[in-house]
């Protein structure tokens, strides 16, 4: 009764209403935060799968060509992934091929396909199979003028090779196989490994991991702050990687040593720009685990050539 006379009852009712509203807003905020955290985690997980999916897409495209036999038009007769002793044997067989003067053509094909002058030379030999060469870039195409041998090769190093007619195919061993002194560097957002090799034997090594946040989880701090921290950690990691590669920068002690830079495609490109590098070749590879084993997997994957028999 006294509360009503003094007007306190209405105030207590208002306080109760505001407390209820505050509780509803708090629950709504927590639910929204959970949704944002889950969305961020899902996006980051998807980014980590991009490199694996790129390789899988290429594999499925090749399988589709073989499975869909009812499809009209030419198809690749044989496709193989070559590495190690098998790659060396096939390379030796191709380089031992001999024909008459200017009877063997070797030409590099980039992502844009073959040029019109090369198309004019190849079409009489390959006919409708010429479309297969256009679809396979970047690659090397080897064909003899009688059409007895026609293949494309996608080695680790695809040179910018103009149409070359000789009595043998113009293929260099270092495009396909580890030869002489060279370096292979693997870089991920949180890992770096550098191996120096003499042929296929590793003679020097350096590897490390950096503390880079993985995925955003509930609570702690906002998504925006998480992204800023992660980006800063990745920048610090790339700086460490650039320092480790300093010996292979232009003007360094090992200027003539070929450098092959592999790993996550976006990180590989960012490191090349960060360190001012012009690597001999780059490649996206899926190498997981600790630095040492990951580098071994990366080297195994990098020194692989896809052979297609037209």
Image: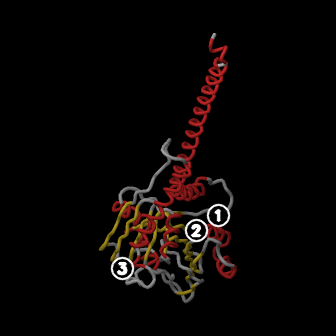
Of callouts 1 and 3, the N-terminal one: 1
Residue nearer the viewer, 139 or 31 = 31
Residue nearer the viewer, 159 or 189 = 189
Of callouts 1 and 2, the N-terminal one: 1
Dots 1 and 3: beta carbons under 8 Å? no
Say if 63 sits above or below 295 in the image: above
For the residues labelled 2 and 3, the Cα–Cα distance comes to 34 Å
Residue nearer the viewer, 26 or 280 = 26
For the residues labelled 1 and 2, the Cα–Cα distance comes to 9 Å
Circle 2 is placed at which residue position? 310
Of callouts 2 and 3, the N-terminal one: 3
Q: Residue furthest bottom?
A: 101
* Residue 259 on image: x %, y %: 43, 76
Instruction: Describe residue 69's horizontal placement relative to residue 252 as left or right.
Output: right
Q: Give the residue drawn at x 35%, y 65%.
A: 207
Circle 1 is placed at which residue position? 74
Residue nearer the viewer, 207 or 261 = 207
Circle 3 is placed at which residue position? 181
Instruction: Describe residue 129's horizontal placement relative to residue 190 as left or right.
Output: right
* Residue 146 on image: x %, y %: 59, 79
For the residues labelled 1 and 3, the Cα–Cα distance comes to 41 Å
- Helix, strand or loop under label 2: loop
- Helix, strand or loop under label 1: loop
Type of colouring: secondary structure
Q: Give the residue drawn at x 59%, y 37%.
A: 29
* Residue 91 on image: x %, y %: 44, 75
Dots 1 and 2: beta carbons under 8 Å? yes
Few, some or many C-alpha atoms within 10 Å of disc 3 (few <14, some 14-19, many ≥20)? some
Q: Give the residue drawn at x 37%, y 84%.
A: 253
């Amino acid at each position: 009764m006294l509360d009503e006379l003094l007007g306190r009852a209405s105030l207590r009712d208002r306080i109760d209403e505001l407390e209820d509203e505050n509780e509803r807003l708090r629950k709504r905020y927590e639910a929204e935060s959970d949704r944002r955290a889950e969305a961020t985690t899902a996006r980051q997980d998807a980014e980590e799968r991009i490199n694996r999916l790129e390789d899988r897409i290429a594999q499925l495209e090749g399988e589709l060509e073989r499975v869909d036999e009812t499809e009209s038009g030419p198809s690749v007769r044989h496709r193989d992934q070559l590495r190690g002793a098998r790659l060396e044997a096939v390379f030796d067989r191709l380089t031992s091929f001999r024909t008459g003067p200017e009877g063997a053509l070797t030409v590099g094909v980039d992502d844009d396909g073959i040029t019109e002058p090369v198309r004019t030379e190849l079409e009489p030999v390959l006919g409708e199979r010429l479309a297969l060469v256009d679809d396979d870039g970047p690659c090397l195409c080897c064909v003899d003028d009688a059409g007895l041998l026609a293949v494309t090769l996608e080695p680790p190093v695809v040179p910018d090779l103009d149409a070359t007619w000789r009595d043998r195919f113009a293929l260099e061993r270092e495009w396909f196989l580890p030869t002489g002194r060279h370096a292979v560097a693997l870089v991920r957002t949180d890992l770096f490994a550098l191996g120096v090799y003499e042929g296929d034997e590793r003679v020097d090594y350096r590897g490390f991991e950096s503390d880079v946040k993985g995925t955003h989880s509930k609570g702690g701090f906002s998504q925006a702050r998480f992204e800023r921290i992660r980006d800063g950690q990745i920048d610090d990691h790339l700086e460490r990687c650039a320092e480790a590669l300093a010996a292979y920068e232009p003007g360094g002690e090992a200027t003539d040593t070929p450098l092959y830079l592999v790993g996550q495609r976006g990180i590989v490109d960012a490191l090349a720009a960060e360190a001012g590098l012009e690597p001999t070749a780059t490649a996206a590879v899926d190498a997981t685990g600790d630095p040492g084993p990951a580098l071994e997997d990366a080297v195994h994957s990098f020194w692989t050539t896809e052979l297609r028999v037209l």
